[in-house]
Image (tube, rainbow, N blue to C red):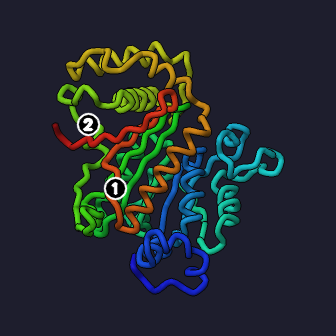
Amino acid sequence: MDGEELTEQETALYDRQIRVWGAGAQRRLSKSHVLVSGIKGTVAEFCKNIVLAGVGSVTLLDDRLVTTEAFNANFLILPDENAYVGKTVAEICCDSLKEFNPMVHVSIEKGDLSTLGVEFFNKFDIVVIGYSSRATKKAVNEKCRKLTKCVAFYTVDCRGSCGEIFVDLQNHKYTKKKHDETVECELTFPSFEEAVSVPWKPFPRRTSKLYFAMRVIEQFEETEGRKPGECSLSDLPKVLQLKKELCEGNSVSENHIPDSLLERLVSGNTEFPPACAIIGGILGQEVIKVISGKGEPLKNFFYFDAEDGKGLIEDIPNKL
């Protein structure tokens, strides 16, 4: 991603950023290629942030037709349904993002993310998946790991006022400041499948309840054949029954996952814009850190709950 030197136009446009993280980091940003799938409120915030930061290209994949539901929290889609008849979310968001920074190449890709071959992902340095099923997250993460180069993989999911980010950088080297010196560091990350398959019993008591609650919701949607976020309050009895089964299977108390939290998640089909801004901002910051190679990255889950205003990082290994 180091590539060529910045052009005079790039140097002038990104002058303030270069003063913060240096010309080398900005050069790597300008040569990076990002794939983004599932463009709702949080992902729209993320896309805006990386386009303004000056990545090389952003490819959008979201074949959903624009409806009134798509307007919710996604500021890239103006609330005028008549103007978008027959157009996809990716097409409309692509046009909006181009206006933020004409120097970033924004394009669309059509197709089903889960059926794309391994080589498709070789075109990208960063892959971000929003609002996808557990099976799709596992499959795409596995394809990224099969490539000879390291492709940074992220998932993001925002339900109501709660959100989750997952990060897999495989083996990542970076630099950070320590006692006025720059030191080189390396981190090893588990895959998505490894990180969500760890038995619950050995987890520390302080572990975010959202980690467990999201696993329940993911499994419920997969078992019931639902699309991500396709839950309602009427599903709560089945969700609570599944929680009971999962807690028994992992030999932990049902108090591990508050019923009130699951109730909020199943009824949280509408994103909370302030939560989208925070989670999308964190995700954008993490991607910029990884591309630039500067600063310690998030490892490997981040949770935010607007109800208490707390953001928590959880380092979930492949075994405890």
Question: Which label number is shown at residue 197?
Answer: 2
Dividing the picture into quadrants, the one containing residue 23 is bottom left
Residue 117 to residue 112: above or below: below
On the image, the x and y values in percent for residue 3 come to: 42, 82
Q: On the image, numbered disc 1 is attached to which residue?
A: 297
On the image, the x and y values in percent for residue 87 come to: 72, 53
Residue lying farthest right? 82
Left or right position of 81 against 101: right
Identity of the residue drawn at 29% across and 61% down:
146
Q: Could you tell me the amino acid type at mark 1?
A: Pro
Question: Which label number is shown at residue 162?
Answer: none
Going from N to C along the chain, the mark reached first, 1 or 2, is 2
Q: Could you tell me the amino acid type at mark 2?
A: Ser
On the image, the x and y values in percent for residue 58 come to: 54, 65
Front residue of 61/255: it is 255
Q: Looking at the image, do the residues carrying marks 1 and 2 touch, with CB atoms under 8 Å apart?
A: no
Identity of the residue drawn at 59% across and 45% down:
40
Left or right position of 246 against 282: left
Dividing the picture into quadrants, the one containing residue 303 is top left
| Secondary element at tag 2 | loop
Identity of the residue drawn at 60% across and 57% down:
48
Residue lying farthest front? 180
On the image, the x and y values in percent for residue 31 come to: 47, 75
Q: How many marks?
A: 2
Residue 10 to residue 81: above or below: below
Front position among marks 1 and 2: 1
Identity of the residue drawn at 27% across and 58% down:
170
Quadrant in the picture for the N terminus: bottom left
**Within 10 Å of the Cα at label 2, are there few (<14), some (14-19), or many (20+) other Cα atoms?**
few
| Secondary element at tag 1 | loop
Residue 159 to residue 176: above or below: above
